[in-house]
Structure formats: structure tokens, C-alpha cells
Image: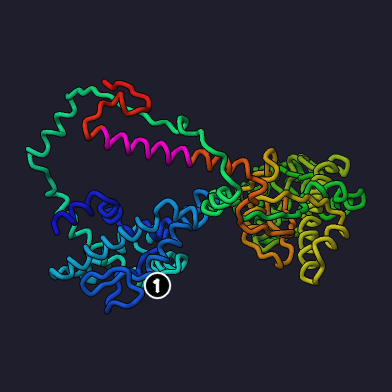
Amino acid sequence: MLSFFRRALSSWVIIGLLGLLMLAFIVTGVGTPSSMGSLGGTSSTDIARAGDRSLSVNDVSHRVQLELRQAKEQQPETTMALLLQGGVLEQLVDQLTDLLSIRAFGEAHGMTVSDKLGDAEIASIPAFHGASGKFDETRYQQALSSRGITPEEFRADIDQSIAIRHLLVPISASAGSPRDLVLPYAALLVERRSGSVVDFRNSAFAAGPAPTEAQLNAFYTANRARYTVPEQRLIRYALIDKAMIAKSATATEAEIATQYKKDAAKYASREKRDLTQIIVQDQKTAQLIAQKIAAGSSMAEAAKAAQADAILLKASEKASFAEQSSPSVADAAFGAAQGRIVGPVKSGLGWHIIRVDAVTQSGGKTLAQARAEIASSLSSQKAADAFANLLANVEDAVSDGQTFDDVVKSRGLAVISTPALTVSGLAISQPGYRFDPSLAPLLKDAFQAELDDDPAMIPLGATKDAFYDLDRVIAAAPKPFAAIRATVLADFVANRASKAARKAAETALAQAKAGAPLASLGGSTRTLS
């Protein structure tokens, strides 16, 4: 039993489990083997059983599908046949069986996981943390939902990971080798050896009778996966670019003039005035102050005589001054010429006597001065509106039952037809063809669509969309034998030579073990030192 755990520790288990398998499942989306190791008796679909837990065909099938999905993310042309050729099925069965056995061993020795320990493990996973850095129930539920995992399934997987980790870590920590076992390997670091090698190269066995058509066909059939072309799709699309509408969206002179009037306040000049103001509470006092000023007294002298203050207001604008006093006072102050005395004028504050000290004008644009600015703004807005309207119009037309050809023809859109493309944009029939990388969203959507789906609009950025139709789907299939006969022939000869070279090497090995000198075994002998 101990040797079994030593083997597990040297494989994927210690790496995967100590890194918390479930965290990887949620963050990367590889999936979760939550059904693996279900309790119950053995059924006809069980592959392995350990204690009260079993590994079913469905468990393994589910994991193989997940492995295929992950492989396709790295190499889109990967098929199930190619994946299985690499021995993935055997590896998965071995790994899942190891995992099942370890968990069953722990349960047989009373190892259980408390709810509190499981809760703490889940709360420590960064993928479930919110903006505050703490566990967020909403993010937790969303993460599980996006992967199609129920909280119960995920909790079972967490408990399993904790149990196996607690079982394997102590074993790993104590794993060591006896001195007598280590010394021979350590000696290899300083040991030098020399010897001879006999090479049996494939090229030396390439000669042979020409294969018959039946042999070639049999080889082709047995190696169909090698010659399989991945699924290909032909797409027709039309680009709808905001720049296409720019010319027709130019602002007219009438539109510019109308907009100038609407923005009159924006383009009007701004008048500012320096004012000196005296405010008193009764009209009679205000009139006496006005008379003194008219007789030649300064504002300050007249105010002082009435026990009031002459207040200087710099760079006042009419709107703000009206808010501070009243509209009627502001009208009087901003209607008088520079140097004039205004008042008394009544407001809620009292009676105002005002002198206009200075008048300055700033800003302001005539229609001619503002024309370029207004034209640019209007044209940009018209183009944006026209672009949005065209996109909506196209989508409405599709909803009303118009075909791709109807839509592009009635709107004068240029149609581009692609050759047969793989999901990565390769054109097998046209090696020199290069699919535009900026159209990647279009290609991705086209490989998710069904052949009878309506034409669709795909955004390619803020100012460009692609309107496309899936024209044809070519299922994954081997290339016709007649089209690749020369390739099959070369592969057949290479395979035959490889087998012959291996057979010769195995025969030579048996002879060498029987005492025959290497030089007499044929092949190409070389010395190693």
C-alpha cells in the first residue's frame, strides 16, 4: 500500500491536489469530476471500485470531453480521434483510479472533512473574493453557475481535495531513500563510461517492393485520422464602416446656421463690469447719497456720510449679479454706460446706488468663426446616427425575413466571400490565403452558428460591424485517397522501413545478448565516450 502512495506522489496527484484542484477547475474552466467516486454498489458501467466508491464510464467520458475542450483552446484543429491517439484515455483512467483509491483508503481509516474546514477552504479561494478582498457569495454562485457546477458538487470536490491532501502531505514529507539506494545514482554524476552503439536507420530499409493498391488503401483506412481535415466553413460577409457614411453625413449650411442659433449663448460674447455699490435700507437715504454723488462727492464719501459702505465688485457678470441682487437692479447696472451712476433701485436687500467703473467684452464667435467647429460636430453626429440607423435597418430587414443577398443588394454593400476556412482561419485549399486578424470575432461566431441560422451582425469595434451569412459547412473528413495517394505512398514506405529497422534492431539485440560482437550485427556502429 505504501508503494502505491509513493507512486501517486511522483505523478500528477501531488501537484494537482496540493495546488487545490477545485481552484483550477473554477478559474480555468477545465471542469470538475464531481460525480467521480460516488457512493454505492458496483454497476455494469463501473470501471473501478475502491471501498464504497466507484468510477463509472460516464465519469471518464465526462473528463475526456473536458480534456478535448481544453485541447481545442490550444489547438482548434484537435479532434477526439487525435486526442485518443495520444493515450489520454489510458492516462485519465489511471489518474482517476489513483485518486479513487487514495480517497477510499482515507475513509477506511476514519478520515473525514468537517463543514467548518470545507467552508474555510472555499472562502480562501481568490476567485470568490469581491472588491473588498473577502469572500463574496454572489461571485461564488456566478463562478459555479458559469461552469455548470452546483454548490453541492463543488463542496463534495473540495472535501475530497482536502481529504486527499491531508493524507498525501505527511507521506510526501517523510518520503526518502536508503543510503545504499542513493549511492549508485550519486556515483553516476562522476562516473564516465564508454561503449558502442549500432544504429539501424529507417533509410537503410526504405527499399522494397512497390505496395499494391490494396495495401495502400488498407494503410490509408487504418490511418484515417492522420489524413483528416478539420471542419471548414465558407463565409460571405459585408463590412459596414462608419467611414462609408461620412460623405453623405456632411452638415449643410442651413444645419450649421440653425445650430449656431441654438447655441447662441455659447457663442455670444461675455460682458464683465467693475461696479461700485452702496446699499441702504430706506429710499430717502438712498436719494440723499445719489444727490451728493451727483454734486461731486465720491462714492466712498457719500457712503460714509450715510454710515454705509461703498463695495467694489470686480469682473461681475449680469447673471451672477442678478442672483445677488435682483433682475431689475442687474438690468439697470448692465444697461448703463461706463462711468454712469445708477439708482436708487430697490431689491430685497434694500436700495442700491451703483456706479459703472469699467466694461469689458470677452470671447464670442461669429457664425463664420464658429462654422468649422459646428460643421465638424454636426457631421460627426450625423455619421454616428446614420451608422446606428443603418445597423438597425439591416437587423430589422433580417427580422422581416430578407435574405443576405436581399439586404446587401438593396443597400449597396460590397460582399466578400472566403475560401473554406478552419476555425483558426487557415485556408487548406489556398495555402497563401491570410484571413484578416481584425475579423476574428466574425470567424468565431461563424463557427458557432448553424447552417440555417439567419444572417448576423458582428461588432468589430466602435465604428465597424460585419454582416455575414454562413454559406457552407464542410464536415471534418479524411482527404480523398486519390488526392493524396503520393503522400500515403510515402507514409507507407516510411512506416514499413521503420518496422523493418525495429525488427532488425530487436534481432541484433538478441544476438548481442547471446555474445555476438556488435560489428557482426549489421547496421552502423559508432563509439560513445
Q: What residue type is labelled 1?
A: Thr
Would residue 274 be counted in the magenta stretch? Answer: no
The residue that disc 1 covers is: 150
The structure residue drawn at horizontal position 28% and vertical position 77%, both measured from the top left corner, is 42
Would residue 506 be counted in the magenta stretch? Answer: yes
The structure residue drawn at horizontal position 37% and vertical position 40%, both measured from the top left corner, is 503
Above/below status of 58 relative to 437: below
Closer to the camera in the image, 299 or 207 = 207
The range drawn in magenta is 496-511
Which class describes the residues within 10 Å of circle 1: few (<14), some (14-19), or many (20+)?
A: few
Q: In this view, does 460 lie to the left or right of 368?
A: left
Q: Which x, y percent locates residue 38?
A: 30, 73
Q: Which x, y percent locates residue 404?
A: 80, 62
Q: Is residue 291 left or right of residue 222?
A: right
Above/below status of 131 relative to 303: below
Above/below status of 164 relative to 491: below
The structure residue drawn at horizontal position 77% and vertical position 70%, both measured from the top left corner, is 399
Closer to the camera in the image, 37 or 207 = 207
